[in-house]
Amino acid sequence: QQQVKQSPQSLIVQKGGISIINCAYENTAFDYFPWYQQFPGKGPALLIAIRPDVSEKKEGRFTISFNKSAKQFSLHIMDSQPGDSATYFCAALHSGYALNFGKGTSLLVTP
Amino acid sequence: EPEVTQTPSHQVTQMGQEVILRCVPISNHLYFYWYRQILGQKVEFLVSFYNNEISEKSEIFDDQFSVERPDGSNFTLKIRSTKLEDSAMYFCASSLQGMDEKLFFGSGTQLSVL
């Protein structure tokens, strides 16, 4: 069964700190790894995504680090802000098949 | 930015009743999806739809579920005989070129089966 394991389940970070969320996958055929951000009452929204041919992708304060040999990838949020408080889902996909989501991480950034 | 629109936002139904959840995907998108999220759990894939037919479905999407694109704008999910365990937030999503491109999700329909 294709699975994506995400940790931690919840995370509290002070404003200005670094938030780190980790994911691990099993299926080496996965070739697309997006992160989705979900605010209460809203659907998930694509935040950033990476393909396995690169080890890192940065967009503003958000960075994905990808370790193909360890089958792990992580989201780093630099200079975390209260507005970043949301649930974050990692996901993985094998081209042509459905997205597999992790269980989500509830992030709270305190002022 | 264009949006995926879902109606209703909340739906309460009795066990055994039929429900239809409605979605208007982004107008130029070609791929359509339904996902669901049981409270506190991960987002789960139900079905994908392309070129007027189902392209993939999960184990959850059994004979009680069906999807339809009745016209050029709407995309619906029908649950024929609802069960208590169907209670969840149902998300419609669409994409331009397929699952490995950006999916746009609607705000969801919260289905409560009593």
Image (cartoon, helix red, strand yellow):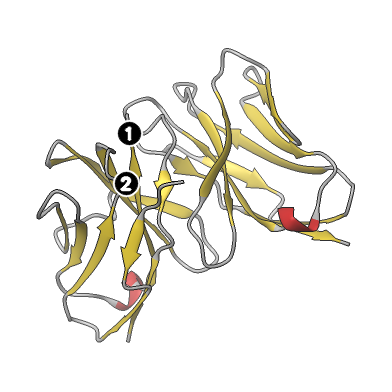
Which residue is depicted at the point 19% across and 52% down? B73
Residue where numbered disc 1 is placed: B96
x, y percent for residue B111? 35, 74
Disc 2 element: loop
Cα separation, mark 1 vs mark 2, equals 9 Å
Q: Classify 10 Å Cα crowding around label 2: few (below 14), some (14-19), many (20 and above).
A: many
In the rendering, at what x and y percent does residue B87 appear? 36, 73
* Residue farthest front in this picture: B1
Residue type beneath disc 1: Leu
Is residue A71 toward the left or the right of residue B73 in the image? right
Q: Are marks 1 and 2 in contact (CB under 8 Å)?
A: yes
Q: Earlier in the sequence, mark 1 or mark 2?
A: 2
Question: Horizontal placement of B86 versus A19: left or right?
Answer: left
- Which type of secondary structure does the marked residue at label 1 adopt? loop
- Of all chains, the one bearing label 2 is B
Q: B104 or A108, which lies in front?
A: B104
- According to the image, label 2 marks what residue? B26
Amino acid type at circle 2 is Ile
Give above or below for B30 relative to A29: below
Q: Residue at x 24, y 64 (%)?
A: B22
Quarter of the image where the C terminus of chain B is located: bottom left
Q: Which residue: 12% across, 41% down? A: B53
The reply to whether label 1 and label 2 mark residues of one chain is: yes
